[in-house]
Amino acid sequence: MDNDRAKRALIGAVRAILRPLVRQLIAHGVTFPAFGQIAREVYIDVGTRHFALPFKKQTDSRVALVTGIPRKEIGQIRRGQMPPPSEAAQGSHGLAMRTLRRWRSDARYLDAEGSARELPYEDGKEVSFSSLVDDIGGDIPPRAVLDELIRLGAVELLPDGAVRVAEAGYVPAREAEEKLRILGEDAAELIEAISHNIETPASEAFLQRKVYYDNVGALAVTEIRGKVRAAGGAFVQQMDEMLARYDRDRNPAAAGGPRKRVVVGVYYLDQDVETEGEE
């Protein structure tokens, strides 16, 4: 495969990887300006670590050459001088959180007990939800901010049109945080394994296998999930018992050599198939 075709294939792969990732980013309020800075920082980190020349120190100019990022920005990021993207630039979610904080702290929006009081959405009065959003500034309409806060479960829209802060407020669930941590670990490990196989001869490839069928009836999915869960659990248990014999913390007599991580994973997915003119 020539370089242009390989690059096009890679870009297609990146688009596919980014779709579920961007869905999670948007759902958790990480907007494009924030993602852009994260991507910039990772480009610089990878360019610094993995694309240095063996005969000289890695310079900002060299990193700029391989990443396409201006040398000035590279210098700022490598030396910790680049500030995070401002909340004002982070779209409706960032503005929504600032609105909620102002609502809970500004005396104009508090009741006699110091709690966030119910606000009319917009009725011409000086104090309303719309005036609260306008106080903070930005070019996002109050209704978009309200819709985002409702989606997050942070506020409630009452039958009379008033808006109030939900009693529990918006607190990310600990379970969700753990699942997002696993997203970073497991997805990165899978991509690292595939990248290894792209870069090395087949004789040195890591295990990378899956089975795939695209005409399975939806009525069978519950049964399939149960069977895969049982088989996958048994396989993981078998791998755990086998690998434990090679782990030097568990077995001091295990083989020596430089320290390595060994990961064996299994996953299952079912999705609707988009078809044309087919039931």
Image (cartoon, helix red, strand yellow):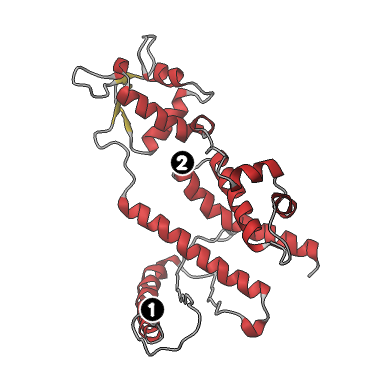
The amino acid beneath tag 2 is Gly
Please rate how many residues cluster around mark 1, counting C-alpha atoms within 10 Å: few if below 14, some from 14 to 19, many from 20: some
Secondary structure of residue under mark 1: helix
Q: How many marks?
A: 2
Q: Position of residue 260 (x, y in %)?
A: 49, 77
Secondary structure of residue under mark 2: loop
The amino acid beneath tag 1 is Val
Residue located 56% across and 53% down the image? 19
Q: Position of residue 185 (x, y in %)?
A: 46, 63
The reply, left or right, for residue 261 in relation to residue 277 is: left
Q: Position of residue 121 (x, y in %)?
A: 37, 19
The quadrant of the picture occupied by the N terminus is bottom right
Question: Is residue 163 among the parts visible in the rendering?
Answer: no
| Residue nearer the viewer, 3 or 76 | 76
| Residue nearer the viewer, 162 or 19 | 19
- Compared to residue 254, the image places residue 63 above or below, namely above
In the rendered image, which quarter is residue 45 located in? bottom right
Residue located 38% across and 33% down the image? 149
* Residue beneath disc 1: 236
* Residue beneath disc 2: 29
In the rendered image, which quarter is residue 3 located in? bottom right
